[in-house]
Amino acid sequence: MDDMTLPPGVETAEAQEAAGLRSRAGDEAQEADGTLTGDPVRAQVWPPTPLTGHLRQLEAEAIYVLREVAAQFERPCLLFSGGKDSIVCAHLARKAFTPGRIPFPLLHVDTGHNFPETLAFRDELIEELGVRLVVRSVQDSIDAGRVKEEPDGDPSRNRLQTVTLLDAVAELRIDAAVGGARRDEEKARAKERFFSHRDGFGQWDPKNQRPELWNLFNGRKLNNEHFRVFPISNWTELDIWQYIAEQRIDLPSLYFAHEREVVNRDGILLAVGTYVKPRPGETVRRERVRFRTIGDMTCTGAFRSSASDLTEIIEEIATARITERGDRADDRRSEAAMEDRKRLGYF
Amino acid sequence: MDLLRFSTAGSVDDGKSTLIGRLLYDSKAIFEDQLEAVEQASAARGDPSVDLALLTDGLRAEREQGITIDVAYRYTATPKRKFIIADTPGHIQYTRNMVTGASTAELAIILVDARKGVLTQSKRHSFIASLLQIPHVVVAVNKMDLVGYSEARYQEIVADYRAFAAKLNVRDVVYIPISALHGDNIVSQSQNMPWYHGATLLHHLETVNIGAGRNNVDFRLPIQYVIRANSAVDHDFRGFAGQIVSGRIAVGEEVVALPAGIRSRVAGIHRGDESCERAAAGDGVVITLEDEIDISRGDMLVRVRNLPHSSNQIDATLCWMSEEPMKIEWPVSNSFSGQWYWLQQSTRRVRASVQELNYRINVDTMHREDAQTLHLNEIGRGQIVTTEPLFFDSYQINRATGSFILIDPHTNNTVAAGMIRDRARRVSELVQKQEEREAPSLRPSRSSNVVWEPVAVTRPMREELNGHGAAVLWFTGLSGSGKSTVAKALEQRLFALDVRTFSLDGDNVRHGLNSDLGFGAEARTENIRRVAEVARLALEHGNIVLCTFISPYEGDREAARALVPEGSFWELFVKCDVEICKERDPKGLYARAERGEIPNFTGVSAPYEEPVQPEMVLETDRHSADELAQQILEALVRAGIVPGGDS
């Protein structure tokens, strides 16, 4: 985005000016009537503390994108998965439109394989934001014969979500679905636009994307087409955690280290529960784990960790040597697994 | 921790991917599973070594073809800074991707292969960096290991690049000799190049001044969205949301809303949950005003005494990004015939049409070329008309308000990126100015009681004797555009053909005939009036009269035309970009004018009204004076003024 660099703190700016480093030619000198003198910045005693540096720029960029969505589209929605990225998006949307309400609903595509913690958290957040929640479930798509569960071995409904999502887009005539995907997550996502066009079949054409220049986002489309919009494209996993810490954003307990029964399947630790039953030969063990991403219980791997608060998590992420999606069975299928799913309309 | 966005361009051959891979790897931004995946993919393809390009080339087609097609964004951070890397392909057919990557960058890394030196591709990247006004450029002289870490070779390349970059508009160029493959001068100082005492690449990236391209002066807030709320706390809240793209603002300051032009004062500034006293460029804010004003998306809040330009005609550099070539619509009426585009600038989207393409720029040679249209990846300069006025600054001083995109209304694709140079002039404005100038001094018939003495020898008799016709060739153009040079070349040719000529030059008449005149608008008009009268006398005596005058006002030139018989006045527009005129500056006048020593200097502090319908346009930045003189001569022959022959 053009000119996203934020100004130095006001004190710094004034110091620069005093040192003659900054030109004020053409600008009105406001000191004359005293408006700019006095207290430099109203002290912020109310948490959270004002952001600085890169987080402040990333936040401004995301808020700018969210406002563009509200301005350019008629029926946008915010895709909410219960994961930290969509929680951060919801938080950013609140900040973008405060003191007004978020001018679009949250859409949860429910795989039916959720962690119970996720659902409880979701409902509390909706209450707090005062925003409308729309739920469309994969189970309904299965019952209606729109999709079939994979027959053997992998009961993941991750892939099936695409159909439910596209059906919801058509049913609700959604013209922009805002998601929390980040470019650093995965190599196909590194090429995704902020405003990512989807054709009438919900397909992404990675080789034919619209160029995106400066911060001019082109949301024009035909009637049956829609956009996926990614306000936090430029954030990294570490940025997300630092932001969560600085903004004191609540998260589901799954993200913090806790004791849980897991099985080791193909090198991925899966949480044992209603949807993941140990297979013959697998032993259930009780481990101290946490999750780096939260999706369908059947494919989201836990990892052994003792990081039980944000400071410890940030420390852990900063030194991590594996990407956060490294524990996602859905991405491990092939070198272009994500690109292939995205082409078909995946998140 | 702050944030630096930089771009790289190039292909695998340049070592670009290796360099990025090295930066990511050395700053530990590559994860084990990523490296593992790349190792597996390389092995599966039978590559002898791990191909770090696979880290950046994310799309299946890119991996299959071994090339970078699209802009990929990579992220890394050191304890000092977060970096967003726009990694773009370098081939000419991906110029649009380079432009895209450059549009948000504050720094560009230009890769030069130490063995090959400064090649076309490096020049192309530099030109684009200059065009997009990236404030910092790093010339990374790569593969130093392959030239034996030779200082002489490095210095040679630096000298070459310097000579080339003199033609560019880049403010800060830093040269670093590196070997991306071996890590020399990437993170730590190279032991192999003790002669190099500058910063390593990473150190430079960590310390380069961020915000050099930011405009801190001109407050501009394009309105994105109007926020309303009605709660116990925020009773009838109505705030204007947007991102401050330049300048600063504080509570209590007076602002004006464009296009309405209504003034008010800032009552409050909100940044998310914070209520602040002031905000500056980059901040996403919601501003409330003291008065109820009707403001909506696309409007702009600015300061009363610091206004942007407002016009529905703009002069812009365009980079064409679509397979479908640019459609030019000639202004025929007040409505568009269908060859129009959406133009999106700041938060405004209006209908627009390209009315004229001035020239195309060859991105490899930077030469201007004649062109009918722009095709994919071509860059040129054109004149655009919009249905509603835009509020803008030139891209050079404000990247945010000086940039725009064009959108095809049928496909909805983004087809062009534009950078505003200036506003174009409207014919109606010129007419109005002319009227203003003419109003106070209605004096054309000052000597109307003087009757022309009938002449014994008439012009046709003289023309017959001379064997050629008479005409007034009126060369108009900026100082330094080459009027006199072309006229002299033409006069020599005419003389050789036994044609009688008479020349009137701006500088010469001001020494005598017009030495009593200054350079204000009125004096310029009088200057031209006198000269036109002399030209008319010379014409009547059977000469081809060559007049070389800046003659900036359309109205004055029209007055000169009106003095002579129809068909014998040729307005020759000597066209040359003002920047080039400044470079030429044969008399050192521009330099003095820019220092303020010469008031009312055309092109610097006084306007030049381009001819609307000149008989000929002579583009001296694209053709030599001899070529142009020849063209005029040929036109005179075709018009039957000068006899045809073996000329």
Image (tube, grey):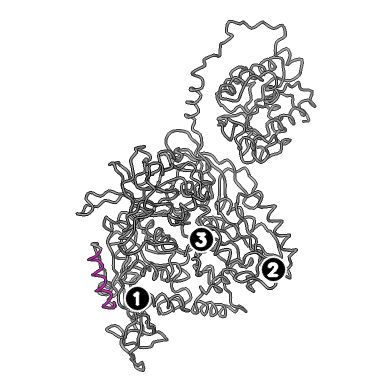
Residue at x 44% of width, y 74% of height: A337
Label 2, label 3: how far apart the Cα atoms are: 26 Å
Q: Could you tell which of marks 2 and 3 lies nearer the N-terminus?
A: 3
Based on the picture, tell me whether residue A126 belongs to the magenta stretch: yes
Judging by the rendered image, the residue that carries numbered circle 2 is B144
Res A90 seen here: no
**What's the magenta region?**
A113-128
* Crowd class of label 1 (few under 14; some 14 to 19; many from 20; radius 10 Å): many
Asked if residue B403 is positioned above or below residue B530 in the image, the reply reads below
Residue B19: x percent and y percent? 59, 69
Judging by the rendered image, the residue that carries numbered circle 3 is B5
Q: Quadrant of the C terminus of chain B?
A: top right
Q: Secondary structure at mark 3?
A: strand
> Left or right of B120: which side holds A156?
left
Q: Main secondary structure of the magenta part?
A: helix
> Left or right of B293: which side holds B559?
right
